[in-house]
Every structure is written in C-alpha cells, then in structure tokens.
Image (cartoon, grey):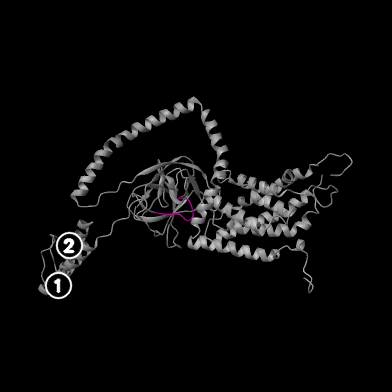
Amino acid sequence: MSVVGHQPPPFFNRGPAPLVRLAFFVTLALAFLVLDLRFHYLELARQGISLALFPLQRAAYTPVELFDQVSGHFVSQANLKFENAQLKRKELEGANWLMRQQHLELENQRLRQLLDMKERQKVPAVVAEILYAASDPFSRRVIVNKGTQHRVVAGQAVVDESGLIGQITRTYPLQSEATLITDKNQAVPVQVVRNGLRAVLFGIGGGQLELRFLAANADVVAGDLIVTSGLDAIYLPGLPVAKVTRVDRDATYTFARIFCEPAAGVEKHDQVLILGSRAALSQPSEEAKAQVEKIDTTNTSKSENMGKTGKGPQKEKVKTPNQGGAKDSKGNKEQKVKNAT
Amino acid sequence: MQPNYSSRRILLPVKPWFILFTLAVALFLNLLPFGRAVALPDWVALVLAFWSVREPRFIGMTMAFVLGVLMDVAVGSVMGQHALAYLLLVYAASGLSRRILWFSLTQQALHILPLLLGTQLVMVVTRLASGADFPGFPYFLSSFVATLVWYPLTFILLLPQYQPTEKDENRPI
C-alpha cells in the first residue's frame, strides 16, 4: 500500500495479485470450455493453431516414421512370402464375387429402373493411412494422413477391409481426426442382418460395443452380424460393423443388454478407406408436391361426393367406399412422389 | 551440488530464452505419437511446475494458458481443458515455491506429486463433466512417473546455471 504521495518504486511493481490473475485466466479457460463444448465456436481458432503447430507435430512424428521405415526394411523374406501367399489366396477367393459383381450390379440397376426406384448411390473413396492414435485418453480417436487438402470433410465414414471403423470428426489441412466406433460418444445406426431389426450401436470403451434400446425380448442372439442401416444418410447401407458376442436379458431392465465386438480391426493401425459423403436424399420438388396435393384433394372429394371408387391402380377388392378412397389417394401419392424423385 | 536454499552453492541467473526453449522441448516431447500408452509423464506440466518453483516471477499465468491451449489443440481434447489444469498448477507451484525450495530434491519431488495429481484430476473432472469416458486409474500413473523424473530433470534444467564464467578453484560458484 502506498502512503499518500509516495508511489512504490517501479521495480516493486508486479502487476495484479496472483489470485486476481488466476481468476481472470480461469474464467477465460472456462469460457473456452463452454464455447467449445456447447457451441463449437472455436473450430476456426483450432484450425489456425493446429496449422502453426503442424511443423512441430510433423517433426515429432519423424522419428516414428524413420523407425517404421528402418524396421520395415528388415522384414524377413519368409514373412513377405507368407503374406504374399495369403494375399493370393484371398484374391482367388474374392475373384468369384468380384467377377459376378459387375454383372449383378448391372442387373440390379436394370431392375431398379424397371421398378422406378432410385438408383443406389456410388461414392468415391480415398485411401488413407492411420498415423497414430490421438493421445487424448478420454476418447478413442486416430489421426489419418488425409485432410481438407484431399477433400476430406467431417462426417465421412472410415472403413478398413473388413468393416466400419469410425467416422471423420474433425479435419485439418493435411490430416484429419477419426473417431472410432468404440468411442463412448459415437453412435452408429445399424440393423441385424438376419432379421433386419434396426437399432443404434454405441461404443462402451475397452474395444467393446453395445446395441442399445432393444426390448428385452428382441430377436438377437450371439453370433448375429450387424451392418449399417444407412438410415442416417451418412453411412452406406450394408457396411459390416460388428458381431454380437453376448446378450443379457434381465427382466428388471426394459432393454436387453447386447454386447458386440467390432468386425473391423478398429484398434489396429493400418491402411483405411475414407468413403465419400453420401448426398442427402433429395426432397420432392415443389411441382411434385403441388401435383400430389391436387390429386389428394380431387380423390378425397370424389370419394366424398360419389361415395364410390375403383379407378385406382390397385387391383384389390374395395370393401367400403371411404376406405377405398383413402387408400387410392395414398397409393397415387406415393407413386407420384416416386416418379418425381 | 544441492540446488535448494540450504545449499551454499550460488547459481548463475537463469536465461529467459532457456526457459522458453525447455518449454518448447517439453511440448515437442508431449507431441511424440506414443498413442494411448499410459504412464508417460506430461512433460509440459512437469517443466512448467519446475520453472514455477524455481522462477515464479518468470512463469506467469499467461504462459500456462498459452501452453495449455497449444496442448489442447495438439492432443485434440476440449479447448480449455489443459489450459485450466496448467493454470491451477502454476498458481499452486509458484505459491509453494518459497517452501519447496528449502527441501532436498527427494522431498521436493514429494511436494510435486500432489500438484501433478491435482492437475490430472482437474482434467478428469473437466472431461467427465462433458460426458467423456473415464480412462481408468492407470491414467494417474503418469504423475508418479513424472515424480521419479524430478531428480534428473532438476539436474538437466539447472545445468546451464552451474557453469562458471571463469573457472576458479577457491570460489563456491
């Protein structure tokens, strides 16, 4: 405290008290936490800082890369031979499917055209390599060596040769971060192959997955294969995700506890494929909507006025006029929408 | 060679660039891609704690905050997680600096252990509050390893200050 008229000499001046400074910076840190967690406002700042940090990160990765190269150089010939033989066998086994795939795909396309259904989307894919696992111990993420420069965007699915391993959740210019399906906050919409039962798959840590929100008597048994359902418009339908390992049916809980293990080598580090993002399903155009509404109103008025139908495309017998009218309009509507899209 | 207040040895003043250099090296060590290996010390926290104890006037909250944000980005954790933990660490370490420096290096390390554990606890609480997964108790091993490293670390970081400008057998420096 300065006595009146006497300022302390400048070399005693040490700025605000430590507690004040602490309070200021803690508030700032908490603000950062909230902004990042709740509102995701800091992504741009993160991009900038990560770009500045990139040389250091790259330098830190160099020793590992060097070690990999050196150790890869001395892989024994026997090892290579064995791997080569295995790959050849796999190729032969897969050739059967591959040869027929083109034919089947063409056939499928034709049949879909005949049925007036939308064609299945084809998506491009980028081959990437997992550099290392992110060292954040609270989540399960890996860093892959393709980023926004290679047109990778957040949301794309990451697969390896045997199934889905995760999803790109954050992109940097030259690399991106993929959250594995075993992460606690990662959910994948899936269905059981055997009976088409749809559910959501969550990571539970320890490399395990859990199929949640299925009734205690749901038809799932150990050994069931689980694939993506494609309902989210993110993952392509039919990607293998997991295999059911154990089903606990406890009457005290509403839901069955279904544990699964991933089909792909989720915690292994290898080459992966980043699948291009699916285009969102197109909405019916305004014209089509208007047309549908017109048909709808005319049909309902017809059924009300005449009390008689039978002009619809369905060949089934109409029991009561009102019901038939409703069905008719619905059938027309559906068909119109299909044609329009 | 006892780098504490009880020793009669007088050290050279520290060079500010050396502090910054060691912090940069610590950041580099933290960035080494060891993946999810446990029990690796958080070098940035350790070096920050060291300099906050040795030079509490040089290491400020700003430094802790900036390094914390850099770590957050590098590790890909939530922004502010490391920053908050490092801030509290620096505050506690510089507050305890006058006390810690009276002890021998082993006892100093025992003072540092709860500080580092506290730092990790702050991070765990932050992440659990945001709905992340508890990484398990082996996560805290890294603080114990860091405590073991305190002795050699002190030796290495004080090395430049031991060197006399001109050698003289009869002088304590």
Amino acid type, mark 1: Ser
Q: Is residue B135 visible?
A: no
The chain that hosts pointer 1 is A
Main SS class of the magenta portion in the image? loop
| Whether residue A225 is situated above or below residue B62 in the rendered picture | above
How far across and down, in percent of the image, does residue A17 sit?
71, 65
User: Which of the two labelled residues, at mark 2 and mark 1, occupies the earlier sequence position?
Assistant: 1
Q: Residue shown at 55%/41% (left/top)?
A: A61
Q: Residue shown at 20%/56% (left/top)?
A: A339
Q: Quadrant of residue A108?
A: top left
The magenta stretch spans residue A185: yes
Secondary structure, mark 1, is helix
The chain that hosts pointer 2 is A
Viewer-side residue, B20 vs B102: B20
Badge 2 and badge 1 in a common chain: yes
How far across and down, in percent of the image, does residue B55 sit?
74, 54
Question: Which residue position is annotated with label 1?
Answer: A301
Q: CA distance from mark 2 to mark 1?
A: 15 Å
Question: Which residue position is annotated with label 2?
Answer: A332
Q: Residue furthest right?
A: B170
**The residue stretch that appears in magenta:** A180-188
In the image, A211: left or right of A37?
Answer: left
Q: Quadrant of residue A23?
A: bottom right
